[in-house]
Amino acid sequence: MSQKNIVLNRRATYDYEILESFEAGIVLLGTEIKSLRANGGNLAEAYVRVIQNELWLIGSSITPYKFGAHYNHEERRDRKLLMHKKEIEKLKASAQQKGLALIPLSLYFKEGRVKVKIGLGRGKKNQDKRQTIIEREKKREMSRAMKKFK
C-alpha cells in the first residue's frame, strides 16, 4: 500500500480543526491524471459539497497537461468524488451541523489510482490560529535545541 502525495492543502489545517478524515476516489480525465503525475494541482480554495446524494470537489485546480492539445481538460471544473452511499449520507448529516465543513486535505496516488483525503472540520477563530502559530514556533525551537545537543 504505497501512497505518494500529489497535492497537499496546507491551508486546511491552519483554517480548520480537523475532527475526522475520510478517503474517496475521484473521477478524472486522462489528461488530468497525466498532469497530476507531473505535479500540477492546487486544493487551496477547494471544498466538498453533497449535491443530490453525490460528493463533488469544487474549486480545485489541476493545471492543463502540457501535451494535451485540443483534448485538454478544464482547469477548474467540478469533479465527482466516489464513496459508498452510507458514507455519503454520514458526511451529509455531519456537514449540516452548524460550523462543520467538508475540506479536501490532499490528493495522492494509492495503488495507481488517485484518491482524495477529505476532512470534516470546524472553522478556527483568529485566536485559535494564533495559538497554532505559537505551538508551531515552540516545536521548532525545541527541535533546534535538540539538534544542538546531538
Image: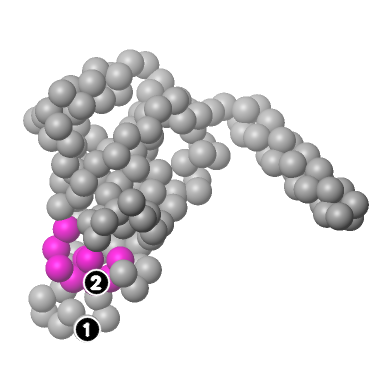
Q: Position of residue 44 (x, y in %)?
A: 42, 51
Residue at 15 percent across and 52 percent down: it is 27
Left or right, 91 with respect to 30, comes to right
Q: Compare marks 2 and 1 and give the one earlier in the sequence.
A: 2
- Tell me the SS state at disc 1: loop
Does the magenta stretch mainly form a helix, a strand or a loop? helix
Give the quarter of the image for residue 32. bottom left
Do the numbered discs 2 and 1 sit on residues whose CB atoms are within 8 Å? yes
Which label was assigned to residue 83?
none
Which of 146 and 116 lies nearest the eye of the viewer? Answer: 146
**What segment is highlighted magenta in the picture?**
28-36
Between the residue at mark 2 and the residue at mark 1, the CA separation in whole angstroms equals 9 Å
Left or right, 144 with respect to 34, comes to right
Q: Position of residue 115 (x, y in %)?
A: 27, 49
Disc 1 crowd, CA 10 A, few/some/many (<14, 14-19, 20+): few
Which label was assigned to residue 67?
1
- Tell me the SS state at disc 2: helix
- The residue where tag 2 is placed is 34
User: Is residue 119 in view?
Assistant: yes
Give the quarter of the image for residue 122. top left
Residue at 50 percent across and 48 percent down: it is 10
Which of 40 and 85 lies nearest the eye of the viewer? Answer: 85
Q: Position of residue 117 (x, y in %)?
A: 34, 42
Measured along the vertical axis of the image, is residue 65 above or below residue 109?
A: below
Disc 2 crowd, CA 10 A, few/some/many (<14, 14-19, 20+): some
Query: Does 150 appear in magenta?
Result: no
Measured along the vertical axis of the image, is residue 137 above or below residue 41?
A: above
Residue type pointed to by label 2:
Lys
User: Is residue 64 in view?
Assistant: no
Residue type pointed to by label 1:
Phe
Measured along the vertical axis of the image, is residue 143 above or below residue 86?
A: below
